[in-house]
Amino acid sequence: MCLGGRTVSLVEYARTVLDTVITPATLSARSFVDLGGDSLRAMRLAALAQQHCGVRLPVADLLSDAPLSDVLARYTSASVPPAAGARRTVATPNPPDRVSPSQRGMWLTERVLGGSPYNLVFTCFVEEGTLDRSRFERALAATVARHPGLRTVYQEQDDEVVPVVDRAYRHQVDDIQHDGTREEFAAFVRVTAAARGRLPFDLAARPAYQFLFVDDPFGQQAIVLVAHHIVLDAWSIGLVFKEVFDRYAALGDGTPPSTTGEGHDIAVLLTKQAADRDAGVWNEQAQFWREHLADVPRVLEVPGDRIRPAVQDPAGKRLSVDLGPEVSPRVAAAAGAAGVTPFTVLLGAYALTLGRWTGARSMVIGVSLLGRDTEELTELVAVTGNLVPVRVDIDDDLVVTSYLRGVQESLAKSIDAGALPFEEIVNLLGVERDLGAHPLVQASFGMHDALIPHRITAGDVTVRVEEGHGGGAQFDVSLLFGRSEPTLLGQLEYATSVWQRSEAVAFTDDYWAAVAELTRDVAGGLTNVRCVSRERLALLDELNRTRKEFPRKALGELFAEVVDRVPDAVAVREGDRELTYAQLAAAAGRQAVLLRELGVQPGDRVLVGLERSVGEIIGVLGVVLAGAAYVGIELNQPGPQLEAILAKAAPRAALVPEYAAAQLAATGIPLCASWAPDWTTQPLAAPAYPTAGTDASLAYVAFTSGSTGLPKGVCVPHRAVVRLAHEPDFVTLAPGDRMLRLSPLAFDASTLEIWATLLGGATLEIYPAGTPSPSELGAFLRDREVTVAWLTAGLFRLVEEFSPEGFATMRQLITGGDVVPHEHVARVLARHPGLVVTNGYGPTENTTFTLTYSVRSTGEVDGPLPIGTPVPGTRVYVLDERCRLVPPGGVGELFCAGAGLADGYLDDPAETTKMFGRFSPDVPERLYRTGDLVRLDTQGQVRFLGRRDHQVKLRGYRIELSAVSDALTESTSVKDAVVVVTDADSAEKRIVAAVVAADDQVTAIMLRDQLAERLPVYMVPTLWAFVDQVPLTENGKVDRKAIVARALPVGAASKRRAPAPGPVAVEAIDVSSVIPLFVKALDDAETEVVADTDFFISGGNSMGAVRLIRLVREQLGVSVRLRDFLLTPTPSGLAALVDKAGPRA
C-alpha cells in the first residue's frame, strides 16, 4: 500500500498518468512537465495521491521545473499529514435534496437573463457503416436508466432549486429527415443542431437534453446531442458517448457492456464538498483567494464598438481558431524550451492578447477544473467542474520564458485552491453585482481535447464527433481548444452584445500572431510580442495616409494672396459694419506699423485682450503681419492667474480695450493703439505688409491649465495653422460662406474660426461681445445666415434644445471640445436635411483639430460619435504605457504627430520634453502624448474613451482635477480631498469636491472662497460632499458615483450636514409595503431597512432575492421580474417596480 512505501506508489501512479516509462535517471533529471505532464495529468496524479495515499500533492509543485523525484520525495516522510478530506471512496448517500453551487448559479442566471448561455451541442457523424436506429435507442435507454443525472429535473421548492429524479423517465429520440442533396447533408445537420441549441429547456419539466437522429435518402446519418450545461459537462458528454456506443457494440455482438450497475448521482459531489468544507479546506483556500486576487481588477473591460447592455445578453457566436501547420508544432516545442505545458503557452498567449487589447497589466481568466478527483466522480454523469479565476500578470520587462512560467505557477496555485466553489470566491471577494457582465470572470480559456473522443468505433460503425454551438455566450469572450492533431484547432466564443463578428475575427487574427510571436523565441523580451498580424498592422498604415503638401509660407503671405484674389469680398462683419478683404488688409497693415513703431520685432509676443470685434481681427492680423506672435487672453481672470500668464508670456506690447488700460499700466507692458474706423481710408505711411516671418515662425501662444494649476503656454508655429486652415478636407470655406466668430481668442477654436475663414475668402460673422444665451445665439445664426459654425458640444446641445431654428441656414456645424451628444445630432439632422455635423477632436498642442468625423443623416447616428480619422498632415497612434503600438481595436493612449504639432511650451523645457518627443520604438517621429484613452473601431474610426490622467474638459476649459484637489488639500481646513465630475455633457457637467474636513466648522462656502483666490472660476467646484473618508470601490479606486450621490450645492453642504447617499426622488414612492418583505427575505430582524438599503450590501444573496420576489407575488399580488429588481435592489427600487406592474390579473 501507499503508506510505508509511499514513494514507490507515487512513482507508479506517475507512470500510469504519464503513460510512459520512468527510470530512476529520468525521475531525478527531468520535471513532470519535461516527462510530458500537463495540468490535466497533474490534477489526475494529485487526485490519485490524495485518494489512495492520503497526501495532498500540490499541482503547483508538479508543474514546477523541479525534478519529479524531488517533488515526490517531499511526501515520503511519515511527518507529512494526510490531506484534509482524504478518502479512498466516497459513500453514496441518499438521493440528493439540493444542487451543487455551480448548478445553482446556472439556474439563477437563467432566471435573471431570461435565456440560456449554457446549451451544449455535439454531433456524431457516421463515417463508416450504417447505424442501427433501434439498437442505438436501446443502448441510449440503458445508459439513461443507469445514470440519475440523465433523469433529473430542477424545480423550485421553498425558494431553493432542488433536483428531482424521475425514475420512470424514458428519453425519446427525435427523427429529422434531410431531403436535399448529398453534398448539403453535413451543412444541414450543423444548421439543425445550432437551431435546436438555441431553443430553451424547461428545467423543471423534463431532463434538459435531447438526442436527434438525422438521415437522408443517400444513407448518410448523424446523431445530435443538445444538452443544458446544468446536466452535462464535457467530461460527462464523453462518458455518455462512450457508454452509449459501447452498449451499441455489445448489443450487436451479444457481449456484456463495459459498464454495469447503478451510476452515481450528484450526491457524491455534494458529499465531497461538504467534507472539504468541514475539514477546513474551504477556509484555507478562501484566504489564498483573498490574498491572490486582492489587487486585481474585478472587471476586464473587453473593448468593442457596441455598448454593453445593462443586463447581460446570453446570445453568442463562435469562430474557428486554427493555428495551422506552421505554428501548431511550435507550441509544444516552445513549451518544452520554457519548461511549461502547451496549455500554458496557449493560455499565456490568450492573456497577452487580451492585455494588448485592454491595456490591463493584471487580469483574471476563468479556467474550468474537472473536479473529478475520486473514482466515483470520474464515473459521474453530471456537472462536477468548478470555474477557477487564474490571475495573469503582464510584465514587459520579462522574457517570454519567465512570463510563461509565471502563468503556469499562477495556474497551478489556482488549481490547488480549486475546491472552493466559484460562487463562494465571488462572495468572499465582495464582487459588486453587475448584471451586464459575468461576475469576476469576463474571459475564459480551456482545452477538452482529452475529454471528448474525436472518433468512436462501435462494431462496424465509426462516428466522428464534432462540437457545435448553442448560440449562447457565458462570458464576453472564451477560447476553447478541442483538438490538438494534426493542428491545434479551437473555437472563440463571444457575446454578440459586446463584439461584432469583425471584432471577433480581428481578435482571432491577433491571437494567432501572439502564439506565433511567443513561440518564435522564448528567450526574447515579452515587450516585443505585440499580438498583431501584418494584415492588421496595415490598418494603422491606412489610417495615417494623410500626407498632403502644404504651402511653406507664413500666414501673412497666404492672406495677401487671398486679398489679391478677392479684394472686394466681405472679410468681416460686426453689426452694421463690414470690411472687405482689401479694407481689412489696409487696417491690419496699419496695426502692424504701429506695433513696429512701438518696438515690436519679429519673434516677439503681443498680448491681444480685445473683445470680439472687427478690431480684434485687425489686431490679430496686425501682430502676424508684424512678424510677431499673438497671445490671446481673457482679462477677467483672477489676479494671480492673470499675473502668472503675463509673467510667462512676457509680451513686448499689448492690444487691450480702454477699460483695461489702467489694469495693465502697472505691469509696464507698452500699450498699442488699436483699430479706428478711419484706418481703412487713410493712406499708409509704410508698406502694407511688413516682414511677416516664415512657416516656422511662431504664430500664437495659447495658455492652458497645467498639471500644477499654473498656466502652460502652447507655442504654435505658422505651419501648424496652415495645416489646419489652408484648404482643409473636413470643411470648405469659400467666398459667399459665413463663419461664426464666437470662441474666445484664448481658446484654440478661434484659430479655426479666424484663419480657415480668412484663408478661404469667406466672411467672419462676429457675435457681439458677451456671453450669449442659446436663444440669442440661435437668432444670430439665423439672422446673419451663417453657413458654417463651431460650437462646443455643450453649447450645441443648448442651441439645439432651445433654438433649433438657428441651424436653418447652416451648411456645416462643427462641434466638439467634449463628448458630442449624439441624440441631439440626430435631431438636428432630421430637422435640417443637407446639414453636415462634424465632430472635431484635438488638443491645443496639435492646433485645434487632430481628428474629425462627419455625419450627414440620422441613419449614420446609431450611438456615440467617433472622433474620427486624422486631418491632412496629421498622423495618430494608439500606444500602451510603454509607448508601444496597440493592436487595432485595443485601448491605449492617443499620440499625434505631423505638421500640426506645437513647438512646445513657452519657457518650459521640462514639460516640453515630458509631452513632446520620440517616445516610441515603433514610431520614429516626434509625438505629442494627449493623455486621452482611445481605440480604433472596426470601421477605422478612432473612438474616445476618457482621460488617462482624469483631466477633463468643462464648458471648453481643460481642467486638471488633480490641481483642484491639490489646492484643497493645501488648506489647513482639509485633511483629504478628491475631485470628480458629474456624468453629463459639457454644458451640464459639474465639478464635485469630496472633502474630509479638519473639523465640524468647515463649510463648502469657506473652501470655495479659498479656491476662488487661487484658481480660475471654472476650476472651482460647484457641488460638495463632506465625508468621513474618501469612498472607494472594491477595486481600491475612488468611488466617483458615491461622491456624486452625496454632493450638494455649495450653500447646503457642510461637515455638520452630510447628506445621506442615494437618490432624492424616491421619497415620493411609498416603501412601507415592501420594507417588511425586505426584512423577511434578508432573514435578519436586526437589520435596519430604509428606502435606499441595498439588499446585497445588507447581506442578501441571489437566492434571497428569489425569495423576496416570491413574497412580493404572494403578499402584494404583483409579479416583478428578478432581473428588474437586481438592477435597483433597494426598497425604493422594488416599490417603483411594484407600482409600475400593478396588481396581477
Image: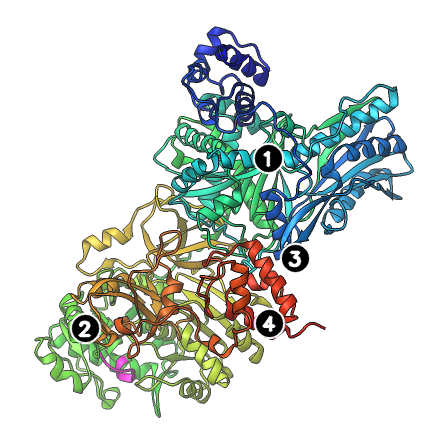
Query: Comparing marks 2 and 4, which lies closer to the viewer?
Result: 4
Q: Please identify the residue farthest to the right as the structure is shown.
A: 217
Left or right: 220 in relation to 597: right
Q: Residues within 10 Å of mark 2 (few under 14, many from 20)?
A: some
Which one is earlier in the sequence, the residue at label 2 or at label 1?
Answer: 1
Picture quadrant of residue 1061: bottom left
Residue at figure coordinates x 41%, y 85% from the top left: 777
Which one is earlier in the sequence, the residue at label 2 or at label 4?
Answer: 2
Left or right: 560 in relation to 1096: left
The residue under label 4 is which amino acid type?
Val
433 and 867: which is toward the camera: 433
Whether residue 920 is in magenta: the answer is no
- Residue 35 is labelled as none
* Distance from Cα at disc 2 to Cα at disc 3: 54 Å
Which one is earlier in the sequence, the residue at label 2 or at label 3?
Answer: 3
Q: Which contiguous range is marked in magenta?
A: 609-616
- Residue 1010 is labelled as 2
Q: Please say if the residues under marks 4 and 3 sit with CB atoms less than 8 Å apart.
A: no
Q: Secondary structure at mark 1?
A: helix
| Residue that numbered label 1 is attached to | 271
Q: Please identify the residue farthest to the top as the structure is shown.
A: 24
| Residue that numbered label 3 is attached to | 114
Q: Secondary structure at mark 3?
A: loop
Residue 209 placed where, x, y %?
75, 43
